[in-house]
Amino acid sequence: MSSVWILNPRTLQVEGKTVKAQIWDTAGQERYRAITSAYYRGAVGALLVYDITKRQTFDNVQRWLRELRDHADSNIVIMMAGNKSDLTHLRAVSEEDGQALAEREGLSFLETSALEATNIETAFQTVLNEIYHIISKKALAAQEAAASTSVPSQGTTINVTDASGSTKKVCCST
């Protein structure tokens, strides 16, 4: 039986801080497409995984990517991964094809093997690092914006020159 919705909470370290991620595995189930698009709205990261032994799964990556870009936040972090790298004798998608598509679409890329646990942690760590940096930058920008828009508590003095050329000081309170 194929997985439909598996929630895998993962805790990883990013720059010395503990980050907990909720990971949803939709396993590419077509019958759940309407539901998955609703989950894209809250997603901050995605791993688009295809099976290197099945060309059709690679060909479907473009459609999944389009759905992500249509429904998710524009700052979503996306990585593409070719899985089953341990089955090189059954390979239907070259690593070069995967890398080329990822570069064209501006995605990070790697090949993984769930069976041998190759690059699995690297994939999650890479996506979480990128998400962490984006969120940190947004938080810093929000703090800077809040600090620069603080209203002075005192009135402001304005020098006004009348037609005779004499200067008068006027104080206006906010």
Image (spheres, rainbow, N blue to C red):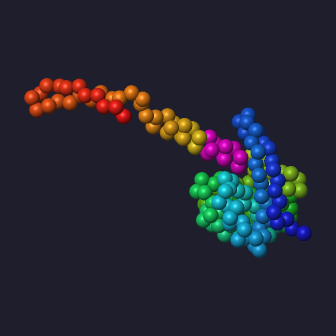
Number of marks in the rendered image: 0
Using the image as rendered, state which of residue 27 and residue 101 is in the foreground: 27
Q: Confirm whether residue 91 shows in the render.
A: no
Establish if 135 lies above or below 60. Answer: above
* Quadrant of image for the N terminus: bottom right
Establish if 155 lies above or below 98. Answer: above
Q: Which residues are magenta?
A: 126-136
Using the image as rendered, state which of residue 156 and residue 57 is in the foreground: 156
**Where is residue 66 drawn, in percent x and y?**
63, 66
* Quadrant of image for the C terminus: top left
Q: Quadrant of residue 53?
A: bottom right
**Where is residue 43 drawn, in percent x and y?**
68, 56
Using the image as rendered, state which of residue 48 and residue 9 is in the foreground: 9
Q: Residue furthest bottom?
A: 31
Within the magenta stretch, is there residue 28? no
Q: Residue at x 70, y 71 (%)?
A: 34
Q: Residue at x 81, y 63 (%)?
A: 5
Establish if 28 lies above or below 126. Answer: below
Q: Confirm whether residue 53 shows in the render.
A: yes
Q: Main secondary structure of the magenta part?
A: helix
Q: Residue furthest left?
A: 164
Using the image as rendered, state which of residue 90 and residue 158 is in the foreground: 158
Within the magenta stretch, is there residue 131? yes
**Where is residue 91 drawn, in percent x and y?**
81, 65
Q: Residue at x 72, y 68 (%)?
A: 35
Q: Quadrant of residue 109?
A: bottom right
